[in-house]
Amino acid sequence: MRRLFVFIVLLFSVHCLYAQFVSLQEAESKAKAFVLSRQTRGSDKAALDVSLAFKYGSSRAVDFYAFNIGRGQGFAIVSGDCGTEDILAYADSGEIDLNDMPDGMSVLLRSYQQELSSLRHATSAGKGGTLSRGNGSSNVQRHMVTPLVKAQWNQMWPYNLQCPMLNGKHTPTGCVATAMAQIMYTQRCPAIKTTRPVPADKYERHEVGHEQMPWHAFRWNIMTDNYLQDSNNEENEAVAYLMRLCGAAVKMEYTDQGSSAPDNLIVPAMVNYFGYDADARLVIRDYYTTEEWNDMIYQEVAAGRPVIYVASSPTDGSHAFVCDGYQKGDYFHINWGWGGSHNGFFRLSVLNAYAPDGLGNTEGYTIFHSAAVGLQPENNIVERPLIQVSELNFDKQLISRQDVDQDFPSIACTFSFKNIMAQPLNVEMALGLYVNGKLNDILFSQEFTNLPAFCEKRLNLSLKPFGHQLGDVNMLGAIVPLCRKKDNSEWMKCTNTDAFISTLKVKHFKMSITRGDMPHENPKLAVVNLQVIGSKIADDDQFVRVVISNTGGSFSDRLYFCVNGKIYGYTGVYLPAGAIDSVAFTFRPKQVGRYVFSVENAQGIQLCQGKMDIVATDIGSLSLPDASQHDKSPDAEKWFDLSGRRIVRPNLPGIYIFNGRKIIVSQDK
């Protein structure tokens, strides 16, 4: 899939004031203890055997250890630093191999490594002891949810047997189609066939000339959880038909290098063609607080509804996959759609980042930016109007009045919201005044008849005067987005109201308005570490990473990356009070010379400044180092790949950075 959003991972809670490294023996003990804690009575004790698959990092500071469990019984990633959770990720089946790993998994591991590195820099600066994850606490009591999806399917044979042919081969199914198909197979939905014919896509019209896709029953009973080389033709064609219809329904673009589809077509396709409930919707991470988002995803899997997640990486594109389980410790189960490879439980947190003009974060493949939720067979019951707020901005943040007994004058604001249901909606929208946690008055309301599916409205409003309800000294209130069905039923919060509550604070003749759960209320940002990572060679990507602490109120805004006084890009950052996080930008200098860069907030206040001196390319030649001599080499830690990531040593021929120079590495004969 293709998206404009890229992200970065924050998975670690800082517990130590100074970095304390974990030895191999300690890591192995932690892995064994973790496996033992997950064993049930009567389970195979041989699964306690753990073996080191690889370790990641430098010889001085290992970032994490990867252990395989038993024989194909899963793996565990153990942190190399005491300042994080012991177990960063794990899987209940399969094994992990550094030399045979899907691209997305390697991106995930690199993001773990970079976050650990950043946090070590922060703690070495003396900041770690006072900082926490800052994600807040949830009111939801969470319990284990075993993985809901048993299918272990991928995008190639036999799943792509009915996909268009290019260069004599069937194209991949596409990750969106694979995620959809696995959930539909799990729920056996639709029971017989699509609720209406799927319109023919351009490939079907070109190759066959039909106006609609083939329309016959799904053969759920002969599809299997796993497809092997000896799978029979009926089984293969049954799953291939399902995959092809999923692709056509989301207007899949098929290529021999990979197939892609936009995520905003997932829900309409599943509701309009595959018999899914009209309450299904696509939710966007930007419009939710961390607590809202995590609770929502948990509640989905706890209710037996797998979720289709969308994630992006600046270097490895975008991916759609399935989240379908939960384990204590905030581990969510991920089915990657790689034929079962590396399915497992992962701790995940979110930082949204936008990357126009070719800029983006260094890594962060598994950050969830959007999710298709409410995926269940149609029950013909609309529980609530599903409205998602996207904007609530006031033209003034400080309002005055002449007398404490009077109302404050009318306030102008912009209010935007969207029907995220796959059907038209009769709804009444409102902005309510809350006092002492209770609805006191409706400051604005308007009815909408047959608001189209996925339609967004943007209103410029003037709220009616109010204020006498709030008293005159240190009284707190809130303006809250609300909605209800057009039947005079009770007012309800929108799906993401908490992220857009505006807090009111009255003191005599003045009233201030601030964003509620995501306020700009005296944040105090400080850069505790800055890194420039890369070759320093013209026309190569250079990475600038900053670790930022926030010792004030919550921060939710853009940070801008400037080069030689001009804005090159920006990143959306949500940094709760007392939190630490890392932000990264990519810059590709075209000319040699000195570049001065800075990171600034929306008001133009500079948080940090640095420089990089760029030289012309200089390519040398070197043979691939002998792995047996690696640990003895004093230059073992001076290798970088062309993305500026430090590597232990090249293990494949190609171009690398060695001691500041580009080197062509060839295979020894």
Image: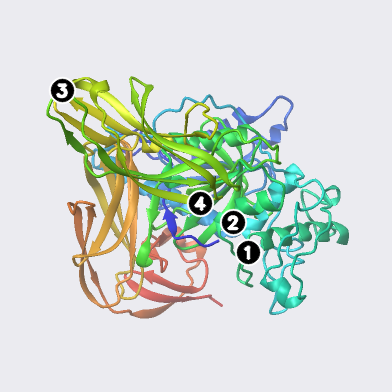
Q: Residue at x 72, y 50 (%)?
A: 274
The image shows residue 578 at horizontal and vertical percentages of 29, 34
Say the numbered circle drawn on residue 140.
none
Label 2 SS = helix
Label 1 SS = loop
Q: How far apart are marks 1 and 2 (CA)?
A: 8 Å
Quick check: marks 1 and 2 in contact, CB under 8 Å? yes
Of the residues tagged 2 and 4, which is closer to the observer? 4
Quadrant in the rendering for residue 253: bottom right
Quick check: marks 4 and 1 in contact, CB under 8 Å? no
Name the residue type under label 4.
Cys
Q: How far apart are marks 3 and 4 (CA)?
A: 42 Å
Q: How many marks?
A: 4
Of the residues tagged 1 and 3, which is closer to the observer? 3
Q: Name the residue under label 2.
A: 265
Sequence-first disc among 1 and 2: 1
Label 4 SS = loop
Q: Residue at x 63, y 43 (%)?
A: 278
Q: Mark 1 points at which residue?
A: 251
Q: In which quarter of the image is the N terminus?
A: bottom right
Sequence-first disc among 2 and 3: 2
Say the numbered circle drawn on residue 404.
3
